[in-house]
Image (cartoon, rainbow, N blue to C red):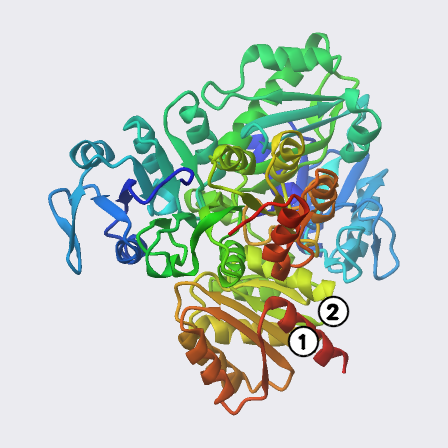
């Protein structure tokens, strides 16, 4: 089992003919992901070809979903048009839209999020590396790779990873894999202040997933999403959880790369979040090199087997 | 992106948010023409820098106060001469201070009562929130901490916009009546429109004031914008003041590098914002101090690495460099070659520790080892951080 997506999930790519979208579509196809459709308005009827793969391109998400049975979209559309691309997924009643795009105006996301209320579609991102459910093949191939993460560093297994940062997620996944600890699903929720899926949403899913035995939660300065998740973990989560918060040395009031990574007050500093993690029984990784080890400590304390 | 108070007030006026009459001046010659636009009588002179705490700041020439009340326009001109071209140090500028390149003269309004008003994004609800308080002219964080009941919040549904009843509720909570209530309501509605239409990240009025004549005015104005939305607001981009930004940060932005200068001595060059932040953290953890945040993005091309090294080396405090790259998709060997070329091109003399991980990493490490450069390889982030801290301390 896994969360959000499985190796059988059929996905479509919005922006499949753009340079960025095309590059990562090829990598996903190589990984064995079921990319069944592409969407580029005006290029409907053409094909995206890669090796033996011939992926049909459609003018709209609803056309693509109807014709191919795709239930999930990966969005590689440039920022000015990305909000519209998400709304198109909502209108087509997809299960999931994963917005990779970085740089979407906040006002657009505020409107999108409001428009998604009560609708079937879940949004992950934007400004995120995407989702990987590793497969059972060599270097985890045969899995579902949506987005831009390096597939080969994963390994199929029992740890769930949720993070606001791309490369920091890869760091955690890599640490797990070299220790021969596999993952159920790795979810990058993105570095923007307004996003579709929170740490808490993902942690609830991991908690409900019988295959997930332990969880790594990676956060950063700004906002209170990690605190909200940590308090829920304390009250409800029976699985070992390790956590890391980036940005202990970040100066107040400066945006550290991610639009959402900014210390606004005393509650959203790294120190404040780490204190809440500890209070909630989350094993804190003292450095980013310690993320996998922290989870091992948490698992040992609860006599849980991760591999 | 931030703008100056005088620019923010011009924007407010455009949206029908009343402000005291004012005029900016960028040269001593401008003082006369600027002051001529104002009526005789009490006048304020306000140093225009992006940092806060101006009123309590001190100039490096000894002059106290970046914001001054003047009984006459003549006095205003004298004070302005002491401010313009001089460096103002406030709690927010750091010890280096900021050079005042513009002064702003305004009518000194008679204050009946001070309030606080701001509009920003509430991250928890993903909606705009209007924050208002009867306690104006002081630090709002302190009000929120000491007397949270005096902070009023209105969450705006982006599908319908700010509703009239919400404005009414807010002005009654703030205790406005009669003509003041009408004026305050209009101001709040117009300020919200300004926030929404310009893609502002935050608009803050502290203080908002009432005058004995029943006017409601924005006495101060602080506005920042969502950088992601600047592409659709060329008129706002034109307000950018490069004098307020670190030259190294401006140079970095030209190469699609995300750089923020800090005050330590170990520079870092990292791909990805989260990894870049945690690289700074791990340097600190092992007893060093980071000199910067630098995210070269997912790609880390040779050109970017060269530009990044040049920017890093422009900081005289830097005593060593830590490169931390997780090459997920990128070939580590390509990145390694970029680092070798960059080091040769800039003639690096400082200690350099490189930690490479990911795709084709063995070839990448070989390239570094065979480059003939005096660089040290780190196996993990922790190992690399410990090595650079030790080298810099030596």
Name, please, the residue furthest toward the left.
A45
Name, please, the residue furthest toward the bottom.
B372
- Does residue B127 sit above or below A13 in this rendering? above
Q: Where does residue A54 sit, x and y in percent of width and height?
A: 14, 52
Q: Are marks 1 and 2 on the same chain?
A: yes
Asked whether residue B245 appears in the rendered view, the answer is: no
Which residue is at 87% across, 51% downward?
B64
Asked whether residue A7 appears in the rendered view, the answer is: yes
Q: Name the residue under label 1.
A: B388
Taking the image as shown, residue A89 lies to the left or right of residue B10, namely left
Q: What's the chain of the residue with tag 1?
A: B
Q: Closest to the observer: A255 or A89?
A: A89
Taking the image as shown, residue B188 lies to the left or right of residue A83, namely right
Query: SS for tag 1?
Result: helix
Q: Disc 1 or 2, which lies upstream in sequence?
A: 2
- Rounded to the nearest angstrom, the CA distance separating label 1 from label 2 is 8 Å
- Quarter of image, res B387: bottom right
Q: What's the chain of the residue with tag 2?
A: B
Which residue is at 58% across, 10% downward?
B165
Q: Where does residue B99 sit, x and y in percent of width and height?
A: 72, 59
Q: Mark 2 points at which residue?
A: B288
Q: Which quarter of the image is occupied by the N terminus of chain A?
A: top left
Label 1: few (<14), some (14–19) or many (≥20) C-alpha neighbours in 10 Å: many
Which residue is at 42% across, 70% downward?
B301
- Does residue B79 sit above or below B213 in this rendering? below
Query: SS for tag 2?
Result: loop
Taking the image as shown, residue A24 lies to the left or right of residue B27, namely left
Q: Closest to the observer: B269 or A119?
A: A119
């Amino acid at each position: 089992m896994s969360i959000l997506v499985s190796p059988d999930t059929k996905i479509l790519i919005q922006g499949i003919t753009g340079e960025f979208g095309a590059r990562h579509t090829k990598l996903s196809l190589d990984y064995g992901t079921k990319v069944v459709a592409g969407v580029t308005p005006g290029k409907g009827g053409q094909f995206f070809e890669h090796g033996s793969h011939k992926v049909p391109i459609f003018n709209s998400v609803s056309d693509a979903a109807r014709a191919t049975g795709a239930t999930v979209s990966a969005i590689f559309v440039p920022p000015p048009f990305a909000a519209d691309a998400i709304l198109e997924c909502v209108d087509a009643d997809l299960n999931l839209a994963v917005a990779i795009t970085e740089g979407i105006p906040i006002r657009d996301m505020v409107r999108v999020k409001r428009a998604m209320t009560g609708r079937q579609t879940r949004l992950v991102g934007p400004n995120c590396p995407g989702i990987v459910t590793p497969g059972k093949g060599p270097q985890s191939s045969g899995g579902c790779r949506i987005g831009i993460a390096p597939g080969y560093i994963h390994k199929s297994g029992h740890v769930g990873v949720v993070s606001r940062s791309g490369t920091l997620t890869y760091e955690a996944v890599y640490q797990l894999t070299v220790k021969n600890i596999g993952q159920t699903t790795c979810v990058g929720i993105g570095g923007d202040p307004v996003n579709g899926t929170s740490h808490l949403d993902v942690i609830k899913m991991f908690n409900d997933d019988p295959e997930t035995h332990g969880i790594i939660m990676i956060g950063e300065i700004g906002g209170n999403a990690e605190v909200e998740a940590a308090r829920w973990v304390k009250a409800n989560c029976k699985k070992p959880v390790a956590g890391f918060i980036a940005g202990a040395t970040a100066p107040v009031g400066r945006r550290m790369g991610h639009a959402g990574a900014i210390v606004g007050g005393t509650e959203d500093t790294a120190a404040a979040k780490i204190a809440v993690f500890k209070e909630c029984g989350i094993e804190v990784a003292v450095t980013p090199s310690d993320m996998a080890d922290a989870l091992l400590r948490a698992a040992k304390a609860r006599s849980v087997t991760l591999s | 992106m931030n703008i100056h108070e005088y620019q923010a007030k011009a924007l407010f006026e455009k949206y029908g948010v009343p402000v005291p009459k004012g005029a900016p001046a960028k040269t001593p010659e401008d003082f006369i023409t600027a002051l001529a636009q104002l009526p005789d009588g009490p006048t304020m002179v306000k140093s225009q820098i992006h940092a806060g705490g101006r009123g309590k700041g001190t100039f490096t020439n000894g002059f106290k106060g970046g914001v001054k009340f003047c009984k006459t326009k003549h006095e205003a001109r004298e004070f302005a001469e002491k401010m313009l071209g001089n460096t103002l140090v406030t709690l927010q500028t750091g010890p280096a201070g900021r050079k005042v390149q513009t002064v702003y003269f305004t009518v000194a309004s008679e204050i009946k009562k001070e309030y606080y008003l701001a509009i920003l994004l509430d991250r928890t609800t993903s909606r705009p929130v209007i924050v208002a308080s009867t306690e104006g002219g002081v630090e709002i964080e302190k009000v929120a901490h000491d007397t949270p009941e005096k902070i009023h919040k209105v969450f705006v549904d982006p599908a319908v916009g700010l509703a009239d009843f919400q404005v009414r509720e807010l002005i009654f909570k703030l205790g406005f009546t009669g003509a003041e209530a009408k004026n305050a309501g209009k101001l709040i509605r117009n300020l919200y429109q300004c926030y929404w239409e310009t893609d502002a990240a935050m608009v803050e009025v502290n203080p908002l004031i009432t005058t004995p004549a029943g006017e409601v005015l924005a006495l101060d104005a602080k506005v920042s914008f969502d950088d992601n939305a600047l592409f659709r607001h060329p008129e706002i981009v034109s307000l950018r003041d490069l004098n307020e930004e670190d030259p190294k940060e401006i140079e970095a932005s030209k190469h699609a590098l995300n750089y923020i200068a800090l005050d330590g001595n170990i520079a870092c060059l990292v791909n990805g914002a989260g990894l870049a932040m945690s690289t700074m953290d791990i340097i600190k953890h092992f007893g060093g101090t980071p000199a910067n945040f630098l995210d070269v993005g997912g790609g880390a091309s040779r050109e970017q690495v060269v530009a990044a090294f040049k920017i890093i080396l422009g900081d005289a405090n830097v005593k060593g460099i830590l490169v931390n790259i997780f090459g997920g998709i990128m070939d580590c060997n390509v990145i390694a070659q970029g680092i070798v070329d960059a080091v040769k091109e800039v003639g690096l003399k400082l200690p350099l520790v490189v930690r490479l991980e990911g795709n084709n990493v063995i070839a990448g490490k070989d390239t570094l080892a065979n480059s003939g450069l005096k660089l040290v390889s780190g196996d993990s982030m922790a190992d690399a951080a410990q090595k650079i801290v030790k080298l810099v301390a030596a």
